[in-house]
Amino acid sequence: MPGKLYIVPTPIGNLEDITFRAIRILKEVDFILAEDTRTTSVLLNHYEISKKMYSHNLNNEHKTISRLVEQLLAGEKVALVSDAGTPAISDPGFLLVRECIKNDVEVETLPGPVAFIPALVNSGLPCDRFVFEGFLPHKKGRQKKMKQLVEQERTMVFYESPHRLIKALEQFIEYFGENRIASVSRELTKIFEETKRGTLKELINYFSKKKVKGEIVIIIDGKS
């Protein structure tokens, strides 16, 4: 019988944010694919899980997928985790899932943490209809993408790194105007969690005066 690939979400900060089922699966699989084995080791040690781990990230996923599918077809049960949140959401995972489906390997995705959901709900902006853009292209294609979003009426969700936050907000002002309402969430579920709401101009004024740390989720109101 072929094995199974489990997509297992992990906490985005607070280690308590993991399901009983996720812990059970991580204990039962033959091995774990981790974006960074050092990061995942912290979680496994916290829950006393002793399991073989192998690196599976953007640098090596193209090279290892064929071998992994062979192992799954041979009956291995494998869990895929990212450093934080749900694999394949702005993290490695899509390519492996697609290849498993092509080869009739069962894929089971567990529900669990993903950073943009608490940020979206906490923003106070409409969350019944939204678009998730993840990380915008750094250079090539960024301007084209921004132009496409100018007429977007749904709430927009973006990921950004802390050192690029101000530049991103400046570009959003360029295309959406300084009075567009938005929110910035950082350090979600951690001790210094923060969500700041206001116009894009107000957000730049606020964050330009402080050193920003932690992964960033930006929520922007759609065009009226």
Image: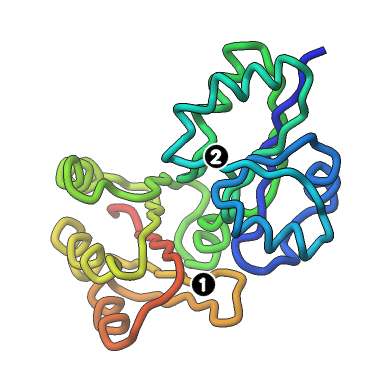
Circle 2 crowding by C-alpha within 10 Å: few under 14, some 14–19, many from 20: many
User: Quadrant location of the C terminus?
Assistant: bottom left
Residue drawn at the location 68% of the way across and 17% of the way down: 105
Compared across the picture, whether 32 is left or right of 115 comes to right
Q: In the rendered image, which residue does mark 1 sit on? A: 187
Q: Position of residue 200 (x, y in %)?
A: 27, 71
Which tag, 2 or 1, sits closer to the chain's start?
2
Residue drawn at the location 70% of the way across and 29% of the way down: 5
Callout 1: helix, strand or loop? Answer: loop
Callout 2: helix, strand or loop? Answer: loop
Q: Is residue 62 above or below residue 214?
A: above
Residue drawn at the location 52% of the way across and 49% of the way down: 128
Q: Where is residue 150 in the image (x, y as percent from the top left)?
A: 21, 48
Q: Which of 112 and 8 is in front in this view?
A: 8
Query: The disc labelled 2 sits on which kind of residue?
Result: His
User: Quadrant location of the N terminus?
Assistant: top right
Q: Which of marks 2 and 1 is in front?
A: 2
Q: Position of residue 215 (x, y in %)?
A: 45, 65
Compared across the picture, whether 5 is left or right of 214 comes to right
Q: In the rendered image, which residue does mark 2 sit on? A: 56
How many numbered callouts?
A: 2
Residue drawn at the location 42% of the way across and 40% of the way down: 59
